[in-house]
Image (spheres, coloured by chain):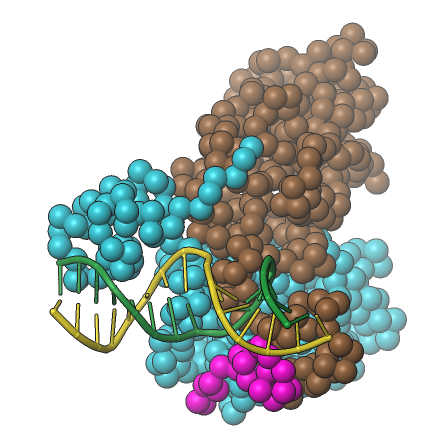
Chain colours: A brown, B cyan, C yellow, D green
Amino acid sequence: MARRSKVTSIDIAHRAGVSQATVSRVLSGSPLVNADTRKRVEAAVRELNYKVDRHASSLRTQSSRTLALLLFEDPTPDDSHINPFFLSMLGSITRACARAGYDLLVSFQQLSDDWHADYEDTMKADGLILLGYGDYLAYRGKLEALVEQGTRFVRWGAVLPGQPGVSIGCDNHHGGQLVGEHLASLGRRRIAFLGDASSHYPEFFDRYRGCDAALAKRGLAMDAGLQVDAVSSEEAGHAAARTLLARGLPFDAVFAASDLIAIGALRALAEAGQDVPGRIAVAGFDDIPMARFAQPALTTVYQDTSRAGTLLVESLLAQIRGEAVESTTLPATLVVRRSSGAD
Amino acid sequence: MARRSKVTSIDIAHRAGVSQATVSRVLSGSPLVNADTRKRVEAAVRELNYKVDRHASSLRTQSSRTLALLLFEDPTPDDSHINPFFLSMLGSITRACARAGYDLLVSFQQLSDDWHADYEDTMKADGLILLGYGDYLAYRGKLEALVEQGTRFVRWGAVLPGQPGVSIGCDNHHGGQLVGEHLASLGRRRIAFLGDASSHYPEFFDRYRGCDAALAKRGLAMDAGLQVDAVSSEEAGHAAARTLLARGLPFDAVFAASDLIAIGALRALAEAGQDVPGRIAVAGFDDIPMARFAQPALTTVYQDTSRAGTLLVESLLAQIRGEAVESTTLPATLVVRRSSGAD
DNA sequence: CTGAAAGCGCTTACAG
DNA sequence: CTGAAAGCGCTTACAG
């Protein structure tokens, strides 16, 4: 199939009997065009199936009407194992972009990559959306560099005082509190926590502290001996639960910092012949689609990914328009399922 | 934060004491540059943190070094319910793009959208990757229009004789055969099929026929009375299984055309008090991450999404280079789990 | 309301 | 090996 020669605004101008500038005005919706002229131009556009060349337009206006979504994970996952939680945000992000007339570039990054410098300097994108779990202290410096350069970005993550740039995140502390109250109300007293609980992983840490705060109200507390580090993957959850069991300390509930960790833990507990939820109640965080199909179905904390995605895009676009934008926290909702004893 | 004024190749030229053309030569890796000159230019590039403006470059070369991934689903899913099977291909597609130095635009489309005309005409992308289930006869016309226009594209889907454009797909017929042989070898004789089995959904149809072919070798056959239409979603699978049960015909196995359908069917069977796998064996297709966590874990057909994604990108890039490209079929592998009686 | 003209930042023949 | 120049296809002040 031979490629057609490209139709330009000059071709439209000839056909409609106007100047090329007028064609451009019609296509950009300028009010400075006579209604008749507009009609003739629009007819020519349709007849020749003309589309504005985005590169020429962007070069001239110095704006690409494109956002870049950087998904990063640490440690490196294999290709097909992107955290389903972030994938479920992808849909609402693309739709929010489409509604605003923006395109979306998607890229998977390692934390170690040079992602802070590329998309804006090359003019490929007007702003960045950063999504992913990872060691916060390790990438905080990169966020500062982004701010320093004047790059516009939003990230999904913990909302912390004094942090560089704009963040949108779930109310992790409250989410943890809901889990703590729920488990305590079931009579659970010794709650293990699987996931890093330090300022390296502030989202996980907030979930931990929220749970601890709920226990404190009942004169209980989290036990450091029942906390095991884990990154957000099924394998890490499986390993962490085995470590926990090997310690031999008594526990009657497991709060996993994410659903992937919880699902791995569920497998390890089953392998060890532990009765869930009879002897041990289990809760996760994220409400990924898989959580409903875990064995038993997983109690977890729902975050509204649809609203989150929309908010990320809108707050980035507001920055691009030059508006002042604040970090925002979204509500967390408890979803009780069989792993903590619901039917 | 004030935005820096843009660094251009002219700034680099001044700093390095060469012409702007030479800067461009260095950055495009031209061999026509003296080693010393190259060093000076590279130093200036580093010092000013210069990046080539992609729009200017693309406008000049008439190529965007960008591919567009169009994910479409029919009927409309809600935001967060993109088929996990396609999501798992996203990772390998983005990585294959990155390796080739291409960017990837991602967009979700309705089948009814005007996706056939946009990305190439606007120069936003050099080619299209089409991903999604949907009524083949309904979008076949759009594929023909793409070919007609000379748009370069690859799609994931059934590989059919005489179809427009280039397709990469799994060997659905063989996959169906593997399922048929497996179920028959377990002594199952009356195999229900959940999913559209017509040329509107050629992938599902091939799976159906493959299963039928396997049964034929044993003097058995699929029974049209045990086939119920369903699109690829959990809800549709649930509804289809209920319809099947309501018919009151005996069956001892269910072959669902996709894992999402199977997972919905599993739920309906459990609600109806049916014993899986005791009385009814169940198998799906796709091996989405959730399949391992279904209750019971789902027997299914694995398609190598990692290789599929890579192949899609490579075959599109080959077309862009002007090479002749053939449609290709990838192998299918049976994964036996508890839903058909494995431990 | 419309047109002629400049210019966005590159790449690449052309000439030397 | 290097530079001067044209030109990719737009948008938008400027002049009328």
Front in this rendered view, residue B308 or A64: A64
Q: Position of residue B140 (x, y in %)?
A: 62, 85
The total number of labels drawn is: 0
Q: Is-magenta flag for residue A11?
A: yes
Relative side of A197 to B61, left or right: right
Look at the image and give the residue range highlighted in magenta: A1-20
Front in this rendered view, residue B51 or A102: B51
Q: Position of residue A61 (x, y in %)?
A: 55, 58
Residue B286 visible in rendering: no
Tell me the quarter of the image containing the N terminus of chain A.
bottom left
The residue located at (35%, 81%) in the rendering is B323
Tell me the quarter of the image containing the C terminus of chain A.
top right
Q: Position of residue B241 (x, y in %)?
A: 79, 67
Q: In the displayed structure, would residue B202 be above or below residue A158? A: below
Q: In the displayed structure, would residue B16 be above or below residue A232? A: below
Q: Is-magenta flag for residue A226?
A: no
Q: Which residue appears farthest toward the bottom when viewing the image? A: B162
Question: Picture quarter containing residue A154?
Answer: top right
Q: In the displayed structure, would residue A23 be above or below residue A338? A: below
Relative side of B22 to D7, left or right: left
Relative side of B316 to B257, left or right: left
The residue located at (37%, 83%) in the rendering is B324
Q: Which residue appears farthest toward the top when viewing the image? A: A219
Q: Position of residue A234 (x, y in %)?
A: 55, 40
The residue located at (66%, 67%) in the rendering is A28
Residue A33 visible in rendering: yes
Question: Picture quarter containing residue A153?
Answer: top right
The residue located at (86%, 75%) in the rendering is B247
